[in-house]
Image (cartoon, rainbow, N blue to C red):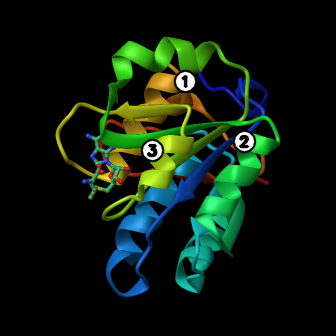
């Protein structure tokens, strides 16, 4: 089974990445970005800073594997969140202090509003807890923004994102029990 762009049930699902420190977080932020793209988000905002290495990774991946992920960096995270709400979107902040995802995902799924999903790195300012429509915990233990985002998107899309195929991909993996098989798409 595979599904394509037509499957996306919400107009916009964007990720707002807070607190990126280029000297420490390159790898983690890159992984947040890769999860965003692979698991069905269609935008990624790197708040308050730009880091060209993150943008280059996105370019390299989408060049071969397809997918159009809107990317913006250096915009104020707070302003972006305020504007998102003003334009009629809703905000979901992933935090271990929030409501367990199982207790709220039905409400979030049934809302057709554009969704801005906020993930932090270290301490997240109170502002984001207050502006969020939902503070959602992927369990109430500390772990990682990468795992939190992956599990949240998987719950949002009920696992369908694992069958998502990008129409503009140049490469496609043919699943194998052993070894690797990759097809070039003409
Ligand atoms: N003390 C932080 C907090 O407020 O959740 C943990 C920082 S953690 C290294 C970085 C980011 O991972 C958090 O800002 C949050 O977005 C995400 N995160 C970590 N554990 C989580 C959990 N159990 N549920 C939801 N998100 C989580």
Residue depicted at x 70% and y 68%:
72
- Nearer the observer, 147 or 117: 117
- Label 1 crowding class (10 Å Cα cut-off): few <14, some 14-19, many 20+? some
- Which quadrant of the structure image shows residue 147? top left
| Distance in Å between CA atoms under marks 2 and 3 | 14 Å
Q: Quadrant of residue 123?
A: bottom left
- Which mark is nearer the camera, 2 or 1? 2
Spatial distance from mark 3 to mark 1, Cα to Cα?
24 Å
Question: Residue 35 at what x, y percent from top left?
Answer: 48, 50
Q: Is residue 82 visible?
A: yes
Which residue was labeled with disc 1? 157
Q: Tell me: 54 left or right of 70.
A: left
Which residue lies at the image location 72% right of the left edge and 34% below the top edge? Answer: 114
Label 3, residues with CA under 10 Å away: few <14, some 14-19, many ≥20: many
The foreground one among 165 and 154 is 154
Give the secondary structure at mark 2: helix
Mark 2 highlights which residue? 85
Asked if residue 143 is positioned above or below residue 25 in the image, the reply reads above
Q: CA distance from mark 2 to mark 1?
A: 22 Å
Residue under label 3, please give it.
129
SS at circle 3: helix
Give the residue drawn at x 43%, y 84%: 22
The quarter of the rendered structure image containing the C terminus is bottom right
Between circles 3 and 1, the one closer to the viewer is 3
Q: Quadrant of the N terminus?
A: top right
177 vs 72: above or below: above
Identify the image quadrant of residue 51: bottom right
Label 2 CB less than 8 angstroms from ligand 1 = no
Against 1, is 132 above or below?
below
């Amino acid at each position: 089974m595979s599904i394509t762009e037509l499957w996306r049930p919400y107009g916009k699902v964007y990720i707002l990445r807070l607190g990126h420190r280029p000297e420490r977080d390159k790898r983690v932020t890159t992984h947040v970005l890769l999860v965003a793209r692979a698991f069905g988000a269609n935008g990624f905002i790197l708040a308050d800073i730009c880091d060209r290495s993150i943008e280059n990774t996105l370019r390299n991946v989408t060049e071969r594997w397809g997918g159009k992920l809107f990317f913006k960096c250096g915009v104020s995270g707070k302003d972006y969140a305020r504007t998102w709400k003003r334009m009629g979107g809703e905000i979901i902040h992933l935090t271990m202090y929030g409501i367990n995802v199982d207790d709220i995902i039905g409400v979030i799924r049934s809302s057709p509003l554009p969704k801005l999903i906020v993930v932090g790195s270290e301490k997240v300012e109170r502002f984001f807890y207050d502006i969020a429509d939902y503070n959602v915990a992927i369990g109430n233990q500390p772990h990682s923004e990468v795992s939190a985002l992956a599990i949240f998107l998987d719950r949002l899309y009920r696992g369908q994102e694992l069958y998502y195929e990008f129409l503009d991909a140049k490469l496609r993996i043919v699943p194998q029990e052993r070894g690797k098989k990759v097809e070039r798409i003409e």
